[in-house]
Image (spheres, rainbow, N blue to C red):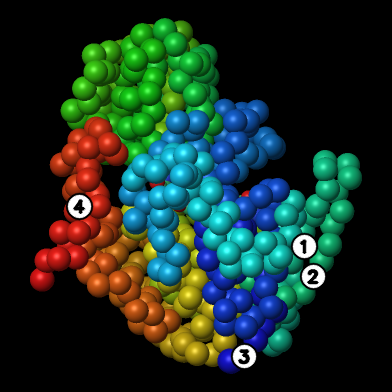
């Protein structure tokens, strides 16, 4: 056993559960703070929506999950398995599909938490409201949490930990599209975070902004009910170019402006008299509880400086983030980040010097700048996924399955494009994996 610390984990979604398991395996004392009443994070579907459907009012009551009722995974279950805990089709289970519905992912995460004895580590209905370094020498962090049924009955508590791992998710704080007239446009505006069911758009003329996986699902779901759907896209995205059975769907360039009489004008010159605008425009990083004295900057599109997306160099290893990346096989990345954090804390994995870590972050920033990519790309792995995953596995001395690199964001995306809009039901993933396994 290496060194053992008293560690706080914020959040009991996928990344928090994986982190708790790895910390426990390394002999650390773990407390997980979870504001919900159950594990699962994003995968805990909530039919309730926020009072402000666009999610811009800072005083709105927050609903954590962004799932819609019909959501099925956009990765096959094999790509959402953990290294030693596969996401299997359960014998006699209700949903044995390769791309299951969200309930099945929740069941998997609940089983995982139970099978690794994580439930006892979690304090449910405990929302963290402050994380602050109080003593740099002894790396003492105060974690302030509140619990209770409602605001008037909240009980607050401050506790001291030697290390904190932030796993609060990054699909809750909506990023909305900005265009002239947005604030005074009279129709219904909603972010996909608050989209649950299509009925609200029956017989409506809808403008939908975005072309990612949520945009794809929502367009497909509302088109059969809506009068017309006008999609505003910057660049052709996730399969949306050749949707069938969507005769009332029309694609445009981005919105130029929205008028007080309800008209929406696109940059391509076309104008529609719309009833609703749905922003499928992604999310911002958001850590309202983190008081880092300016050491960690959060600007919505990126968090930094973070060595390899995990450790702020000057606070490492006592503060870390797990699960910040996108465009990757996320569960695998989170699992390896969690292993790395746990092993660094126990002294079994070594970090470079603070200066070397800061240099590595600077190198990433200058590469982004040189290639003209905005900060939005900081934590986007995609082409760098295989290299990053190999690197993470080496840090934690983890053996990856044979030919794992054949199942990456890019290879999966290619397959999805090949199989088209019904990829979830037409792609025989098991056969594809057998072919990968048997090829040499
Ligand atoms: P979350 O799941 O968001 O968990 C964070 C947890 O932290 C929550 O339980 C929350 O209650 C808690 N928390 C937050 N703040 C506090 C606080 N202050 N105090 C205490 N607790 C707090 N990924 C895939 O691999 N496959 C998919 O098919 C897929 N589909 C997706 C579809 C949608 C619509 C969305 C939004 C995301 C999808 N993802 C998918 C990505 C998904 O976000 C990740 O799979 C994963 O769930 C993220 O896990 P997480 O633990 O980092 O965050």
Q: CA distance from mark 1 to mark 4?
A: 50 Å
Q: Are marks 2 and 1 in contact (CB under 8 Å)?
A: yes
User: Badge 4: few (under 14), some or many (20 or more) residues near its Cα, within 10 Å?
Assistant: few
Q: Residue at x 40, y 68 (%)?
A: 83
Residue 376 is left or right of residue 405, and the answer is: right
Q: Where residue 256 appears, x then y in whole percent? A: 33, 24
Q: Are marks 2 and 3 in contact (CB under 8 Å)?
A: no
Residue 105 is left or right of residue 244, and the answer is: right
Q: Quadrant of the N terminus?
A: bottom right
Q: Residue at x 48, y 48 (%)?
A: 105
Q: Which residue is identified by label 1?
A: 144
Mark in the foreground, 2 or 3: 3
Q: CA distance from mark 4 to mark 2?
A: 51 Å
Residue 1 is left or right of residue 212, and the answer is: right
Q: Which residue is identified by label 2?
A: 159
Mark in the foreground, 1 or 4: 4
Q: CA distance from mark 2 to mark 1?
A: 6 Å
Q: Are marks 3 and 1 in contact (CB under 8 Å)?
A: no
Q: Which residue is identified by label 4?
A: 431
Q: Secondary structure at mark 1?
A: strand
> Nearest the camera: 285 or 333?
333
Q: Which residue is identified by label 3?
A: 3
Q: Secondary structure at mark 2?
A: strand
Q: CA distance from mark 2 to mark 3?
A: 21 Å
């Amino acid at each position: 056993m290496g060194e053992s610390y008293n560690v706080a984990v914020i959040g009991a979604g996928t990344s928090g559960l994986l982190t708790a398991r790895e910390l426990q395996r390394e002999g650390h004392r773990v407390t997980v703070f979870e504001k919900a009443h159950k594990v699962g994070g994003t995968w805990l579907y909530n039919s309730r929506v926020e009072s402000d459907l666009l999610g811009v009012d800072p005083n709105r009551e927050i609903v954590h999950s962004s799932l819609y009722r019909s959501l099925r995974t956009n990765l096959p279950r094999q790509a959402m398995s953990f290294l030693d805990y596969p996401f299997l089709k359960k014998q006699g289970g209700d949903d044995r599909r390769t791309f299951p519905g969200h309930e099945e992912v929740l069941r998997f995460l609940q089983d995982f938490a139970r099978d690794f004895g994580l439930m006892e580590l979690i304090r449910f209905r405990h929302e963290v409201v402050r994380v602050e370094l109080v003593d740099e020498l002894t790396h003492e962090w105060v974690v302030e949490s509140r619990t209770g049924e409602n605001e008037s009955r909240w009980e607050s508590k401050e506790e001291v930990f030697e290390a904190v791992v932030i796993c609060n998710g990054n699909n809750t704080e909506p990023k909305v599209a900005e265009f002239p007239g947005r604030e005074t446009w009279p129709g219904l505006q909603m972010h996909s975070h608050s989209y649950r069911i299509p009925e609200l758009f029956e017989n409506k003329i809808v403008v939908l902004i975005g072309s990612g996986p949520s945009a794809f699902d929502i367009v497909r779901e509302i088109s059969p009910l809506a009068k017309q759907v006008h999609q505003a896209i910057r660049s052709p995205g996730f399969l949306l170019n050749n949707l069938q059975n969507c005769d009332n769907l029309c694609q445009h360039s981005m919105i130029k402006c929205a008028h007080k009489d309800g008209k929406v004008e696109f940059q391509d010159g076309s104008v529609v008299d719309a009833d609703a605008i749905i922003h499928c425009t992604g999310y911002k990083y958001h850590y309202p509880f983190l008081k880092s004295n300016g050491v960690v900057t959060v600007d919505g599109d990126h968090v930094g400086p973070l060595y390899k997306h995990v450790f702020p160099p000057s606070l490492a290893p006592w503060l870390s983030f797990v699960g910040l990346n996108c465009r990757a096989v996320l569960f695998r990345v989170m699992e390896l980040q969690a292993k790395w954090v746990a092993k660094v804390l126990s002294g079994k994995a070594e970090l470079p010097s603070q200066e070397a870590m800061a240099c590595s972050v600077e190198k990433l920033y200058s590469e982004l700048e040189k290639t003209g990519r905005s900060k939005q790309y900081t934590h986007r792995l995609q082409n760098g996924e295989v290299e990053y995953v190999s690197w993470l596995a080496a840090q934690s001395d983890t053996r990856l399955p044979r030919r794992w690199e054949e199942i990456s964001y890019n290879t999966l995306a290619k397959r999805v494009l090949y199989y088209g809009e019904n990829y979830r039901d037409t792609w025989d993933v098991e056969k594809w994996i057998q072919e990968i396994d048997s090829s040499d």
